[in-house]
Image (cartoon, grey):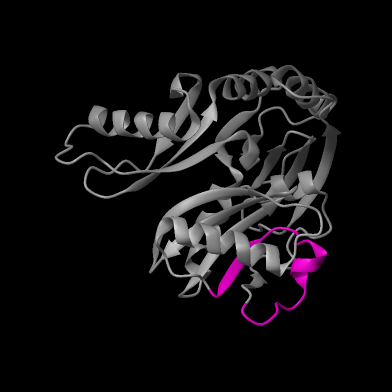
Amino acid sequence: MRRAIGQVLRLGVATGAVSLLAGSRWRHDKVNVLAEQPVPGPGIEALGGALRALLAGQDVAGWPVTVVLTDELCRLWQVAPPPGAARLPDIEAAAALRFHALYGEGPAAWHVTADWHSTEPFFAAAVPRALLALVDAVALENRLHVVQVVPHFVTAWNRWCRAIRPGAWFGQLHDGLLTVAAIEGRQLRAVRALQVPPGADHYWLTQMVGREALLLGLDMPAQLQLCGALPAALDKPAGAGQVTTTRLDAGQGDDLSAAGRLAFSGSAS
């Protein structure tokens, strides 16, 4: 397929499906769905098979591609640097210790990136090394240029963080998982992944957000500003005393599948 000036690929990778879109570097909302493929089972081998089937027959050699990974495949956490930390190895060690405390394992099997800071808390993200190796291998086989591999939450936060209102928290919804950003002032304090049960409503949301606020010692937010497709019960007005919801990306990618919306969120740069 002939690549027009400014065209890029966006690849969404989830545990249940993968999706490939062609988009414009200058028009985020202008995309064309090239292919989608279900993932036949759990594990890297199943994902690899789905990615290869997705790209089979696609004439996209030489195209740049942004890869968006569902938050279910990634890990996000906050790190407090140790007192007096001045060297990057000290800060990396603090991130590794926090990772172990949260997830019960060392980060050896994960590729960790962060906005490293020696005096202030910062956030880190981890992606399985096996998954990155798979993405690189499939890209090489198809002669694609990988621009970035990024967790879904990070794409949404980078795009919408300036639109979050004072006193509100932020959330990314995708395929039954709600990734919530707890915010104090203008600072991101914590990221939590919550499974959304069938029929989840404002009462459920208020209970979950209230629990997280209590654990973090933060005020209860009056509003949760969201990206992604809202469950029907959360798309209705909240009751008295309940957390209200607004959708930041309303009308953007609404006609796409869940896997397509994942790919759609990728940067067009």
Residue occupying the point 82% across, 65% down: 232
Q: Can residue 69 be seen in this view?
A: no
Residue occupying the point 74% across, 44% down: 22
Q: Nearer the viewer, residue 75 or 208?
A: 208
Left of 23 or right of it: where is 99?
A: left
Left of 187 or right of it: where is 262?
A: right
Q: Is residue 119 visible?
A: yes
Residue occupying the point 44% across, 63% down: 183
* Position in image of residue 225 (x %, y %): 60, 68
Left of 89 or right of it: where is 172?
A: right
Residue occupying the point 52% across, 65% down: 169
The answer to if 230 sits in the magenta stretch is yes
* Position in image of residue 115 (x %, y %): 36, 43
Q: Which of 147 and 151 is in front in this view?
A: 151
Q: In which quarter of the image is residue 233?
A: bottom right
| The N terminus, quarter of image | top right
**Range of residues picked out in magenta:** 222-241
* Position in image of residue 201 (x %, y %): 74, 65
Farthest bottom residue in view: 240
Seen in the picture, residue 137 relative to 35 is either above or below; the reply is: above
Seen in the picture, residue 106 relative to 84 is either above or below; the reply is: above
- Number of marks drawn: 0
Farthest left residue in view: 84
